[in-house]
Amino acid sequence: MKTNHFERFGVSSSVMIHASDVRKSYGSYEVLKGVNVSVPNGSVACIIGPSGSGKSTFLRCINHLEDINSGLLLVDGDFVGYRLKDDRLHELRASQICARRAEIGMVFQHFNLFPHMTVLENLMEAPVRVRGEKRAEARQHALELLRRVGLAEKASAYPRQLSGGQQQRVAIARALAMRPKVLLFDEPTSALDPELVGEVLSVMKDLARDGMTMVVVTHEIGFAREVADQLIFMDGGTVMEQGDPREMIANPKSPRTREFLAKVL
Amino acid sequence: MNVLPLKDDSVAAKHTTQFKVVPLRHPWRWTAAGLVAILMLLLTQAVVSNPNLQWPVVASYILNPIILQGLWITVGLTLAIMFFASVIGMIVALMMLSPSKMLSLPAAGFIWWFRGTPALVQLILWYNLSLIFKDITLWLPGLGTIFSIPTNTIMTPLVAAVVALSLHEAGYMAEIIRNGLKSVSRGQTEAALCLGMKPSLLLRRIVIPQAMRVIIPPTGNETINLLKTTSLVSIIAVGDLLYSAQAIYARTFETIPLLLVVTFWYLVVVSIMTVGQSYLERYYSRDEAGHDSAPVGLSRLGLILTMREKWRGAQ
């Protein structure tokens, strides 16, 4: 059974992702040193920061690809990898974690499309096998999503036959095929040739306009300024500064933010 | 300093079309090829004209029922052993990849033991299992003995052959499969997990199909090797191809012609396997070529099957 812990932890029910004092270490090396982030329903949060700042790790914690060592991390009012019972967090079985993960879409830097399946099969695989959708329905939905990312004519192509930008658009469509509550993007344009970045960003802008809740780890400051509702600057495993992107980019408060922005802008 | 005038392209083009190009000669290559041709002619003459090879006798035994029975056992053994070896190999490979030492260490021990001892030794050991365990007994606490059978009634030569060679082959298959599973990138697993796939589904739909591309070529070699290794079972009196031939020439003393019959059939089966392997390889790398042309072999096979079904339906 799903339970919501909005009230118990004093989190507003309009918050999709709530992190307070999230800590994560690999051995003795602490990657996340108490991260506090709140992403409201239907909003877009962009996370920027130098490499090694823990931004990707934080993103991976949200869908439990990494487990956290301490702190509170709720997605839609629920723990991702655990179940709270009698004030104890019980680790969930693989099948239960999967059920929660199915509601959190993720787009990777290196696309990670399934190379042995056609584009259409990539989109239909999880809805049919995980959600138990009927093939005809899944196919219809998949074709609709491919039209939305402008790749309807590539349905029967294999990923290898597509350009990087096209592959990433398919990867976004694949995540959308599961009708997720929230989409996580891990540097979605970093592996692309510069002239292909635009087509992926434009698909992401459309999604934001349609009210999809998104957390985007990115180096595209322009995209963040235009689309994000909040900008989060991470450095050394903590959130150094967060707020309205236009304001933050114009007048960064922390010297570290100013330094970083000066380098990437 | 003299400055050379730049060559006009059209002039250069005219030059190459005007003059005849003389290709480089390879006299030594021709000499070597000639020598090889002469040697091959001599060898063919020696083989064809030698009365000791008794070609008519070879021909008369090719379709001998005892030989064909032996061929059938050899092929059946190979397929059965490969099947069991793949299943056991897959389990051992998954155990090797487990984070738990209690699973990975025994798996490593399995590979060490069954890959480290000769197939022939294991064959004889399993055949003589009754010298170690006289009876095979299932005993449950509280219920007592469920059944007890003398080992010798179970460990027939054929069973010993299948068990010994399956375990031996499983040692190799485990390593091949583990290598294949490891070749699939972590990103693939993560992408599948993020779509909510359970580990079993992820393994079946994402990892194994991609691992197959790495697993198939060495497995084809192993199968060909295994086909020949099964000839060892003649030692414990399993009636395979070699044993059948031996049984005949023990009576008729036509040793060489019968060994040639055996050689002929081994080569025929290996050739068929090689063709089958190349079809499988093409099927599992179908995303690499243009997607219309790749799985020619299998689609043709599919065509034959559907045609046969239609024919059956028409009857």
Image (cartoon, grey):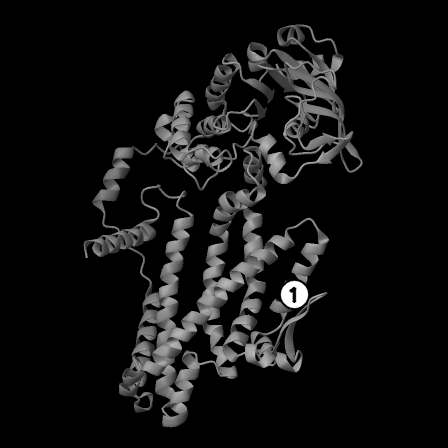
**Direction from residue A244 to residue A170 in the image, left or right:** left
- Nearer to me, A166 or A256: A166
Q: Is residue B95 above or below residue A62?
A: below
Residue drawn at 50 percent across, 17 percent down: A207
Residue A232 in the image: x percent, y percent?
A: 67, 16
Residue A195 in the image: x percent, y percent?
A: 46, 22
The reply to whether residue A218 is visible in this rendering is: no
What is the secondary structure assignment of the residue under circle 1? helix
Label 1 sits on residue: B112
Residue B312 in the image: x percent, y percent?
A: 23, 56
The reply to whether residue A188 is visible in this rendering is: yes
> Quarter-wise, where is residue B194 in the image?
top right
- Nearer to me, B142 or B81: B142
Split into 4 quadrants, where in the image is the N terminus of chain B? Answer: top left
Residue drawn at 80 percent across, 36 percent down: A28
- Nearer to me, B25 or B107: B107
**Direction from residue B280 to residue B210 in the image, left or right:** right
Split into 4 quadrants, where in the image is the C terminus of chain B? Answer: bottom left
> Quarter-wise, where is residue A90 in the image?
top right
Q: Residue furthest right?
A: A28
Q: Residue furthest front?
A: B143
Residue drawn at 67 percent across, 79 percent down: B132
Identify residue type, mark 1: Trp
Residue drawn at 40 percent across, 83 percent down: B244
Within 10 angstroms of label 1, few (less than 14), some, or many (20 or more) residues?
A: few
| Chain under callout 1 | B
Residue A259 in the image: x percent, y percent?
A: 71, 15
Tell how many labels.
1
